[in-house]
Amino acid sequence: MFRDIGQMVILAWRTLCALPLSFRHLRKVIDQFYEIGNASLLMACILSLFIGGVLALQTGPIMVERGLSAVVGSVVGLSLCKELAPVMMAVLIAGRIGSAMAAEIGSMAVYQEIDALRTMNIDPIHYLVLPRVIAVSIALPCLVVFSILVGWVGGGIVSSANADIAVPWQAYFSSLSRVVDNWAVLNGLTKSFVFALVIGIVSCHQGLNTIGGPRGIGRSVTKAVVNSIVLILIVDYFLTRLLLQLDF
Amino acid sequence: MSQAPTKNGRPCVEVKDLRKSFGGCEVLKGINMEVDSGEIFVIMGPSGSGKSVLLRHLVGLLASDSGTVSIEGNVIDSPEILSKYRVAMVFQSGALLGSLSVAENVGLYLREHRLKKPAEIDAIVKEKLAIVGLEGAEDRMPTELSGGMKKRVSIARALVMEPQIILYDEPTSELDPLISVTIGEEIVKLREQTGATSIVVTHDRDLGFGIADRMAILRHGELVALGTPDEVRSSPREEVQTFLNATFQRQSITETQ
Ligand SMILES: Nc1ncnc2c1ncn2[C@@H]1O[C@H](COP(=O)(O)OP(=O)(O)OP(=O)(O)O)[C@@H](O)[C@H]1O
Ligand SMILES: [Mg+2]
């Protein structure tokens, strides 16, 4: 495990070093970006709508009971923005995109395509890893903004429609806008950017280190998704502490 | 960009006491050989004797346990040194990038290194595909090709690099006899045109003896013969003779039953 972590740090470093070359690979970045959006927008929409809804459903009645109907919007809005949207979207992308990255790069490793790249002096990190990491680290924050907005709407719908909560639409959003400022959104975006790097590096690392036949590819995909999600949750805790400390 | 063979007396590729084991099983047991500039050097040997493993050491895809590979006197021990030379490899399986079309595969080297303008790349791709007899296949995907066609695209992809050293791993193993002859002729023609040093791994005896300047026979990770085709043919060693003279004798099988 420690060797894996070491290798991932090296991979991250080498990707970082290759960053100045990214304009050369713009086409591939755009292709990847498009693919990520294509594969996940609908899912993100449904997921966020229901997460916002269930959050309102869980917290709303208790707060209203204690006369706190004025903060329902704040609670739902803030938790979505700072925590739920970044983490849920990261998990979604780890499942949909991280797995695809590991599978694609893994099958290239198994079928000697990466060896072929090497003999052509094409660095697989520049050719394969860099565009994917850049694309996912732009796409995930975008997706999180989208998810926050949809989640707010979901919370609003449930708050106004549920008889036990019955906080009108307008009251919900004015309560929300009192607490949620740009910093809160930025907080969520910072997190999602870090999560994106985790997904990109973990998945590409698993892909590049695939050995064996189809079973090896399967193993890489599973490990990419599981490791990404575990790492995201661990990183999330420490990042939250750090951001709280910085008074974000 | 044709390269005249460097006539400085040094061998172009030199392999010294190369050893490699995979998990306790020794695949290469001390290989020594020298390949001169512009030479066509054929390595033959039965399946599993370590031919592909040997080639992978020459392009730096595998690191040896001990011993060295040097190109023009420089020991290849890092990708940086290797990247100074244009060494192309035609993989046994073709190893085309599955998500790119034939033309993109062939033009990949030029495109990624920004060596030519897109229009020029298209022209070069066309020209190289014509050499391997695949005109008009530009837009097909590797999955739509037969094994032999993949191999030929892979050869075209290697030619695009204008390599100084070109390694062929079983260039004709999936080809019909006619195309095999064409590919054999192409290997020779290419050497004449560019002076590229060619190392050809094959178990096709006709091809091997047809094109070789010198050849070696690899068996169980050891070179059992090395020299000109005539020298190898007249080698007294029994394993060499068995390999060279194996024929399918239907008569004796049917008679013993
Ligand atoms: N990555 C590897 N891990 C473990 N063993 C390997 C590996 N690569 C090759 N070998 C072993 O090394 C031996 C030689 O393999 P190699 O592919 O060089 O044979 P070959 O001479 O090219 O045979 P063929 O003519 O069938 O291609 C085989 O016994 C093979 O099992
Ligand atoms: Mg082989």
Image (cartoon, rainbow, N blue to C red):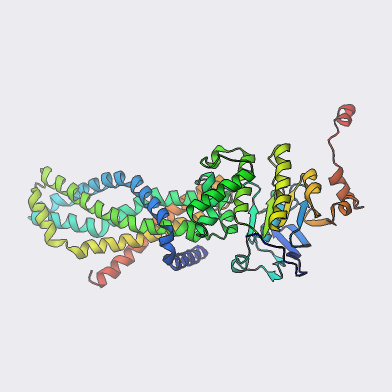
**In this picture, residue B204 sits left or right of residue B116:** right
In the current view of this chain or complex, which residue is farthest to the bottom? A246
| Residue B110 percent location from the top left of the image | 53, 56
Foreground residue among A157 and B255: B255
| Residue A229 percent location from the top left of the image | 39, 55
Which residue is depicted at the point 24% across and 60% down? A82
**In this picture, residue B247 sits left or right of residue A15:** right
Q: Quadrant of residue B193?
A: bottom right
Q: Can you say which quadrant of the picture contains the C terminus of chain A?
A: bottom left
Q: Quadrant of residue B145?
A: top right
Q: Is residue B158 shown above or below A22?
A: above
Which residue is depicted at the point 26% across and 58% down? A83
| Residue B71 percent location from the top left of the image | 69, 66
How many badges with numbers are in the image?
0
Foreground residue among A109 and A198: A109
Asked if residue A216 shows in the view, the reply is: no
